[in-house]
Image: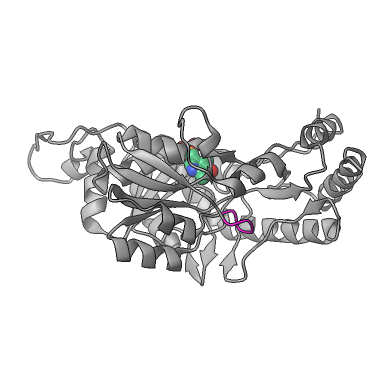
Amino acid sequence: MSDVIALGQPTVGEAELAAIAEVFASGWLAGSGPTSRRFEERFAATVGTRHALATSNCGSALHLALLTLGVKPGDEVIVGDYTFPATGHSVMWTGARPVFTDVRPDTWTVDPAAVEAAITPRTVGIVAVDVFGQPADYDELRVIADRHGLFLVEDAACSAGAAYKGRPAGSLADIATFSFHGRKGITAGEGGAYVTDREDLSSHARKLLSYGVESALNRAELSHLAIPAFTDLGYNYRLSDVAAAIMISQLDRLPDLLATKRAIAARYGELLKGHELITLPYEAPDREHPWQSYVVTLDARVDRGAVAMELRQRGVQCTFGTYASHLQPLYGQADRCPVSADLFVRHLAIPMHANLTEAQVETVAATLVDVVGSFAAR
Ligand SMILES: *Cc1c(COP(=O)(O)O)cnc(C)c1O
């Protein structure tokens, strides 16, 4: 199995181990402690927002985003269709209904015209997804949101280090949410973040992420014994300080990881370009793609399932892209998103992570070209 080329792989090592050892020595391993606060300050500075809260994952950050924006049962929230389950699920956790909306055929992010068409009197907001990390059309979405009095949330799960018109992902909406799951660009195994410029939202979220109780760290800093009262039905959505320590090291690595993946994406582009059955991913000229995944679109004549099985047989890990949410039985919706439905059946994700060698990138590309050619209907 050692010859298998992994689809995704974290880049972690001595720096992260040393950071963990420091937290052990400090005695504060629980969440929302001094190390989490240090990470939050670093992360806010990285994404260019006033506030950042470390959370247990991106799903919990999305849930907090919707709760702090006041989403309630009976509301409708417009969601970019081509995404991971967390985006639609988090809307359902509030009792509201996700209204899945089709995506652009090139960037795969939500189509602003489709958003506009999906607005009803019940619509309260929009959750745009930075698909595989590439930011959505935030200027156009902001205009639509403002015109209709809607909130705008950025599901930035995959987009740490990405940019839109020179602005960092995370700073592009009222609230943005990140994931630090093992398959994302920077990781502590599990983890997430909620970021915003708005003090009212951030202080409400800070409470909700810790059972609705003022944090122990804030209380420890007071000169009297503070007994908190709980007014909100909060959750335990904290990131542990052990994970926060790992994340501080990962932020140190972020520029290198991005540069390495950018070079790999460019190399794939050279090796795969011009193939009649393979369409390369598109990076919009006004955006910086962080390449959380590298996803190609196979021609409709190619048997994707057979290609994927043969690639795996030859030691090249691969998978589908992400989900056409409107087709998932849980949501039971009649929404129509033909572009997303098409991407769902034709996308193939191939190995992309910062530990790939030049030789592995060449092997992946050569194997893909060979296998695609042999599973295409003529
Ligand atoms: C991975 C992902 C999530 C979920 O992240 P978790 O940290 O596992 O909750 C949400 N949205 C998108 C777009 C993702 O890719």
Image height check: is 186 above or below 285? above
Which quadrant of the structure image shows residue 208? top left
**Colour scheme shown:** one colour
Left or right, 253 with respect to 312, comes to left
Q: How many marks?
A: 0
Left or right, 49 with respect to 343, comes to left
From the viewer's side, name the closer residue of 124 and 116: 116
Predominant SS along the magenta part: loop
From the viewer's side, name the closer residue of 331 and 179: 331
Residue 109 position in % (x across, y down):
54, 55
The answer to whether one can see residue 109 in this image is yes
Residue 171 position in % (x across, y down):
41, 62
Quarter in which the N terminus is drawn: top right
Q: Residue at x 80, y 30 (%)?
A: 309
Residue 224 position in % (x across, y down):
7, 41
Quarter in which the C terminus is drawn: top right
Specify the farthest residue to the left.
224
Q: Residue at x 51, y 72 (%)?
A: 166
Residue 186 position in % (x across, y down):
55, 48
Residue 43 included in the magenta stretch of the image: no
Left or right, 97 with respect to 314, comes to left
Image height check: is 75 above or below 263? above
Task: Point out the stretch of residues depicted in magenta.
Answer: 104-108
The answer to whether one can see residue 21 in this image is no
Q: Residue at x 80, y 34 (%)?
A: 4
Q: Residue at x 83, y 50 (%)?
A: 277
Which quadrant of the structure image shows residue 351? top right
Image height check: is 285 above or below 315? below
From the viewer's side, name the closer residue of 283 and 244: 283
